[in-house]
């Protein structure tokens, strides 16, 4: 049992009274695992280490993860004061860097499910898988309120409605922290209000946002797609809009006891959030009463000033408590030491940051149980957690068209045609932030595909014919066909898109499948609504399955009636690209729309 708040404060105060300047500086430092060894973490008194997207051990197994994290923890405990290290990971939809962990639907799907109890259970399950590998911190939930679906992080937002985001974000905080992992509400604040830039991507934008290991190849920016046109941008809104639309989820997260908050790369009216004292200190800490610590995003303070020393001073004085460096931790420590020794950063501000960090470590019980819960290691990927992910995948499915009551399908059919790569591809089901930063197609992890779920759901005498490209052999027709259309995996600004319409290849696939089926069911595997207005006449049923995670059989559950359709749109569904920004026009479907079965 972790100590109570009074005991947490005593632990922090006792340690601060004994700490040298070097030991205090180390607590503010968050390095990524590929850039620091356990011995260096010990020698530099580092406070925290993280695995970014793709920052996995080799082999990528639960046991290797635990060995990696415990090596850092063992080193931290060898320091003079034995202060445990905090290990973080981007476990944003399950322990998603770990191959074999359960991958849950991305937040947009959970927003469609609108089930706070489900989200809380997902948070608890994620925390238990993290603790099995000795990690105690996840950079979740994202409580963004996306306003422009062209944004590549739209799927990280539960909804465009701040009330729903607040409800579900708080639920994930409760679930994660009841399970023993620190939650991190992000990205403070109004990242979802950033405007489309319409200019050439800023030099270095992709690498500044990259959580790929330094030796990994960062994807090339394709400006023709609109990449890096919103992410890390500017929210040009007044304070009333900031407070009314983007603050409520943070109020709810703080009320739920969230232990950490991550600042946003983005700006508010031209001022970077990482250097914004009014928002980080006056609003978040003083007005909202947030008592945990504020952490930066990946290499984000580097954007504040051409002089790195000034970046450090501005960020810490604005209210940043821990800096995700992530690479050159020695340079950060030198700049931080100089700033404190010259008085550019007051000692009181340094001590406040250290106090907040130590208090969070005490709240997690790290001083008593620094190695997590080894007994949970064998249960990573356990059947009961896969059942939870399957439930979530089914509840996320949003039925938009169901002509003639086609769905749910009977288990016995004369023939069933299935088309589309995403019908049998776990990587496409899971999307970005899965095993690697950007995610990728293929059998990236374990689970069930939609096609496997279909084979298990139909009767033994129902022939299922699968053609990824929609080219079915011969001339036979099927009374019913299912076609999946998908977005390729992406994360952050690489997913910014100027056009959300179906591609020529997707339209051709749809037309080929339509020509061979009497009735056609279309499944969209995507991180946001797509522009499908002109293709609607080809569809007898349309399902937004979002990014359902590793348990695609949950989609088959609703297709065949084992679970009813109940998902409702977490965003308005635009008729055209013009309606992305014109919220006064009548959309194709309103926010909250969804058919039930």
Image (cartoon, helix red, strand yellow):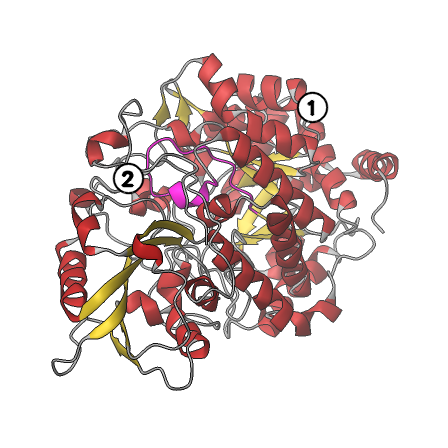
Q: CA distance from mark 2 to mark 1?
A: 34 Å
**Image vertical order of residue 18 relative to residue 476, above or below:** above
Q: Residue at x 26, y 68 (%)?
A: 481
Q: Quadrant of residue 150?
A: top left
Dot 2, crowdedness within 10 Å: few (<14), some or many (≥20)?
Answer: many
Which quarter of the picture shows residue 19? top right
Using the image, tell me which numbered label, if any, was put on residue 485. Answer: none
Q: Which residues are magenta?
A: 139-158
Would you identify the image quadrant in which residue 254 lies? top right
Q: Secondary structure at mark 1?
A: loop
The residue labelled by disc 1 is 289
Question: Which x, y percent locates residue 185?
Answer: 57, 38
Secondary structure of the residue carrying tag 2 is: loop
User: Which residue lies under the disc numbered 2?
Assistant: 228
- Report the residue at 70% width, 23% height from top: 348
x and y percentages locating residue 140 in the rendered image: 56, 45
- Give whichever of 143, 553 is nearer the camera: 553
Q: Residue at x 28, y 37 (%)?
A: 588
Q: Main secondary structure of the magenta part?
A: loop
Look at the image and say whether residue 157 sits in the magenta stretch: yes
């Amino acid at each position: 049992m972790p100590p109570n708040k009074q005991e947490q404060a005593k632990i922090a105060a006792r340690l601060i009274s004994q700490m040298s300047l070097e030991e205090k500086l180390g607590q503010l430092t968050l390095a990524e695992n590929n850039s620091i060894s356990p011995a260096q973490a010990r020698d530099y008194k580092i406070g925290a280490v993280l695995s970014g997207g793709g920052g996995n051990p080799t082999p990528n197994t639960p046991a290797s993860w635990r060995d990696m994290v415990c090596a850092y923890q063992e080193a931290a405990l060898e320091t003079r004061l034995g202060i445990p290290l905090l290990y973080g990971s981007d476990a944003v939809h399950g322990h998603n860097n770990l191959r074999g962990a359960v991958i849950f639907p991305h937040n947009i799907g959970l927003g469609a499910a609108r089930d706070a109890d489900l989200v809380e259970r997902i948070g608890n399950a994620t925390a238990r898988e993290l603790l099995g590998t000795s990690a105690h911190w996840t950079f979740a939930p994202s409580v963004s309120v996306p306003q422009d679906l062209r944004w590549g992080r739209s799927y990280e937002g539960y909804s465009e409605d701040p009330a729903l985001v607040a409800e579900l974000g708080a639920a994930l905080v409760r679930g994660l922290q009841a399970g023993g992992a620190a939650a991190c509400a992000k990205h403070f604040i109004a990242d979802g209000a950033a405007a489309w830039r319409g200019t050439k991507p800023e030099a270095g934008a992709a690498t500044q946002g990259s959580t790929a290991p330094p030796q990994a190849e960062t994807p090339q920016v394709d400006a023709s797609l609109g990449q890096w046109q919103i992410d890390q941008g500017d929210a040009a809104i007044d304070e009333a809009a900031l407070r009314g639309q983007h603050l409520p989820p943070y109020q709810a997260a703080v009320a739920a006891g969230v232990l950490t908050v991550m600042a946003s790369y983005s700006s508010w009216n031209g001022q970077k959030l990482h250097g914004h004292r009014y928002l980080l200190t006056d609003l978040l800490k003083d007005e909202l009463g947030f008592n945990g610590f504020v952490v930066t995003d990946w290499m984000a303070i580097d954007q504040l000033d051409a002089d790195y020393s000034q970046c450090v001073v501005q960020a810490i004085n604005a209210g940043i408590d821990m800096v995700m460096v992530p690479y050159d931790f020695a340079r950060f420590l030198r700049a931080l030491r100089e700033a404190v020794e010259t008085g550019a950063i007051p000692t009181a501000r340094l001590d406040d940051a250290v106090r907040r960090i130590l208090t969070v470590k005490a709240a997690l019980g790290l001083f008593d149980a620094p190695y997590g819960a080894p007994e949970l290691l064998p249960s990573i990927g356990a059947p009961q957690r896969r059942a939870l992910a399957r439930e979530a995948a089914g509840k996320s499915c949003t039925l938009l068209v169901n002509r003639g009551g086609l769905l749910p399908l009977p288990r016995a059919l004369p023939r069933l045609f299935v088309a589309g790569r995403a019908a049998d591809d776990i990587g496409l089901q899971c999307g970005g932030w899965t095993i690697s930063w950007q995610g990728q197609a293929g059998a990236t992890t374990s689970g069930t595909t939609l096609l496997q779920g279909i084979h298990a759901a139909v009767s033994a005498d129902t022939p299922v014919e699968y053609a990824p490209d929609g080219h079915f052999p011969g001339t036979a027709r099927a009374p019913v066909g299912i076609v999946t259309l998908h977005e390729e995996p992406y994360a952050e600004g690489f997913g910014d898109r100027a056009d959300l319409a179906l591609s020529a290849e997707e339209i051709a696939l749809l037309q080929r499948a339509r020509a061979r089926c009497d009735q056609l069911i279309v499944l969209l595997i995507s991180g946001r609504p797509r522009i499908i207005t002109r293709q609607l006449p080809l569809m007898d049923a349309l399902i937004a399955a979002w990014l359902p995670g590793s348990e695609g059989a949950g989609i088959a559950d609703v297709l065949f009636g084992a679970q009813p359709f109940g998902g409702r749109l977490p965003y308005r569904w635009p008729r055209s690209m013009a309606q992305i920004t014109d919220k006064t026009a009548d959309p194709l479907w309103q926010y909250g729309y969804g058919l039930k079965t």
